[in-house]
Structure formats: C-alpha cells, structure tokens
Image (cartoon, grey):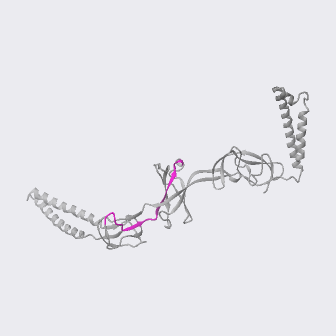
Amino acid sequence: MKKVIYCLYIMAFTIGCSGDQSVSTSDLIAAKNLEGLKTKKEVKLKTLNAIKIELNQINTAISNLDSTEKLPLISMFEVKPENFENYLEIQANIKTRQNVLLYPEYSGTLKKVFVGEGEKVKKGKLLAQIDDAGLKNQLEQLQIQASLSKTTYDRTQRLWGQNIGSEMQLLQTKASYESLLKSIEQLKKQLQRTQILAPFSGTIDEIVANTGANLLPGQTPVLRIINLQKMYTEASVPERYLRQVKKGTKAIVKIPMLEREYLTTIRQTGNFINPNNRSFRVETPLTNTDEMIKPNLSCKLKINDYSNPEALMIPLSIIKENAIGEKYIFKLSPDGKEQVYRTKQVFVQLGKNSMDKVEVLEGIQAGDLLVKEGATIVEHNQRVKNIP
C-alpha cells in the first residue's frame, strides 16, 4: 500500500512538471512574476487533486478486493435520546422545629415529674408540677369571698329594683364582686404557671431536673421534648443557582450514616443573600416514619437544577480535544463491507455531564453511529472495522 501511494505522488510530481518547461518555478521566483506563480500554482493544485481522487479510487478498489486487509478494530454505539437529570450536591443539616428544652415559668420547688424518658406524650399533657407555695389555698379563699360577694351584690340589686337602698351601695357591691373575680383569674393563671405542659405531641427525650430541685423561671431546664415526625433539611445554596433552585424543585436527601436516600422537594427558598458566603437558604421536608433520622445528622442535599427528557448523552471517554480546545468525536458511516465503516471527525458542543456521560447540544443527532472503544487511535476519514 505504501509503495502504491509513493508511486502515485511521484507520478503527480512528474505530470506537474511536464507542462510548460520554458519557464521554471525558480525563474518565476527570481523574476518576481506573481501572475506566473499563481498560474503555475493552479496547474499544480489541479494535478494534485486529480491524483488524490484517483488514489481514493485505488484504495477503495484494493480494500474491496483484498480479503486480508487489516483495519483498526473499534466498537460503536447508536445515539439515542434519554432522560437526563443533573443534580447540584451540597452539604445540609437535618433539623426539627419541635425540639424544645422546657423551662419553668414559676419559681419554686419541682414537686413531681409525671413522665419518663422515651415516653410518648400528647399535646397538653401534664409533664411536671412545681410546688405552688399555697396558691391553691389562696384561690379557694378568694372563691369563697367571691361567692359571698355575689350573694351581697344580687340582694342589693333586688332591693334597688324595689327602690330600696342607694345606687352607691349597688355600685360598691358590684365593684367588690368584679374585683374578686379578676383576682381569681389572675391566681388561676399563676397556678397554671406551676404546671409544665407538653407544647406539642412528641417524645420525652431527656429529664434534666430532679424532683425537689429549686427552679428559676427561664434559667433552670426541666426536660426536653422532641417530635421526630416533622423533620426538614436546611442548606445554603450558592447565589449562581438562584434561577434554577425554586420552590417545588425536585431534590434528594442522602444520609450516608443510614445508607438511605429520600425523595423530596424544595419547600422554601430564602429571600436573603448571605453576604459572607454569597448563598441563600433552602428548606426541604423530610419524612421520618420509623424515627431513624435524628436532628443534626450529617446529610447531603442533591437538588435537580437541570432536566432534559430527550438528551443526547455520550461517554466522556470518546471525546477528544484539539490544540485550541475544540471538542470532537468520530461519526461512522457504512463503507462497502459488512461491519466496515469510515470515520468522520465532527466537532460538538457539550452541556452538563453526569458521572461518565455528557450531554451533546450540537454536532450529532439521534440515530448517529459513533466510535466508542478505539476512539483514541482512529483518525478522520479512516476505514475501521466494528467488533459486534
């Protein structure tokens, strides 16, 4: 094959030089004859193109007749549309808004705790009682006084209806009765503050204070209650994804410690860009039916920032790059024999990529055959053989 090509190039040179021998190339260059040089160049190019066409015909004929022709072996694949989803992966925190350390509202001694650690309770259940320091006795006395005051007020009102007594007496008995009622209401509120109730349904996670301990309002923790049913993740997303990440965007919560993934959606996006790290806050709900997920457990949030149900995906391994950074692949077209194809270099524009594939935006279409294995050894316009 090499001898044939060499002979053909010698023929081309000979034919090119067999034209007008009166003026040589060196003479034209020495005479600075521009028109003459252009004319000689056209003659040479026409001769060379004719030789190339003839050479291709000879190569094709040889390949068709030579059963022992050795061709580079490759594998190929057909480009087919497929669903492609790209995910932005960021670190996230697992939280719950129903995780509360309960403090007393009333100063006194912790009289009794009615629950144990790990116990599930309903909202409003009495969890602990603080010594009321005689408030209950005071309430009973006020209620007795209020009962007598009401009787006095009712009797004065009946007499006033019979034009007996003075209006001042009526007003005084009414004011006395109403004052006692207000005192009773205030005392009841004070008594309620001696009770620690469950603010929501959940589990008693920890009992901090011991029975008999002196409690100070807002300072001495008594117990912790937590609800693991209403969990959520919180993450900071870089501001460059502001247009892609919105309320309702599909997401996946990946928890390495549990080896689990949970499908969810973006429930809330922040309206504030943190100037320190140029990010905004996102929140996703998290189902926790078996209560295996705990607050502050490490997790990753994968947010779907791009989707294309008809994406043309190709392996990253078949993409080559020229000296100026242009990306290209090799397409295949049938070339006479069974499983024999001819390569064509095609430049492509790439989009987002997954682990081992990348989306092609321009350059190929569905149904194209591309070189897969062997892409690094083939060249443009080369005959190759596919290994089925």
Instruction: Judge whether 274 appears above or below 127 on screen.
Output: above
> Is residue 221 magenta-colored?
yes
- In magenta, the rendered stretch is 216-240
User: Camera-side residue: 125 or 164?
Assistant: 125
Among the 4 quarters of the image, the one containing residue 21? top right
Q: Identify the residue shown where x is 24% and y is 68%.
A: 135
Q: Quadrant of residue 106?
A: bottom left
Q: Is residue 354 visible to the viewer in this orientation of the structure? A: yes
Please give left or right for residue 258 compared with residue 111 in the image: right
Q: Position of residue 147 (x, y in %)?
A: 18, 66
Image quarter (top left, top right, bottom left or bottom right) of the C terminus: bottom right
In magenta stretch: residue 348: no
The x, y position of residue 86, in whole percent, is 60, 53
> How many labels, in total?
0
| Residue 168 spot, x, y in % from top left | 10, 56
Which of the two residues, 243 or 45, is positioned nearer the viewer here? Answer: 45
Q: Residue furthest front?
A: 30
The residue located at (89%, 27%) in the rendering is 23
Q: Residue at x 88, y 38 (%)?
A: 12
Task: Tell me residue 157's x, y (percent).
Answer: 13, 60
Instruction: Confirm whether residue 315 shows in the render.
Output: no
Q: Pick whichever, 218 or 234, lies toward us.
A: 218
The one of 26 and 280 positioned closer to us in this rendering: 26
308 sits to left or right of 37: left
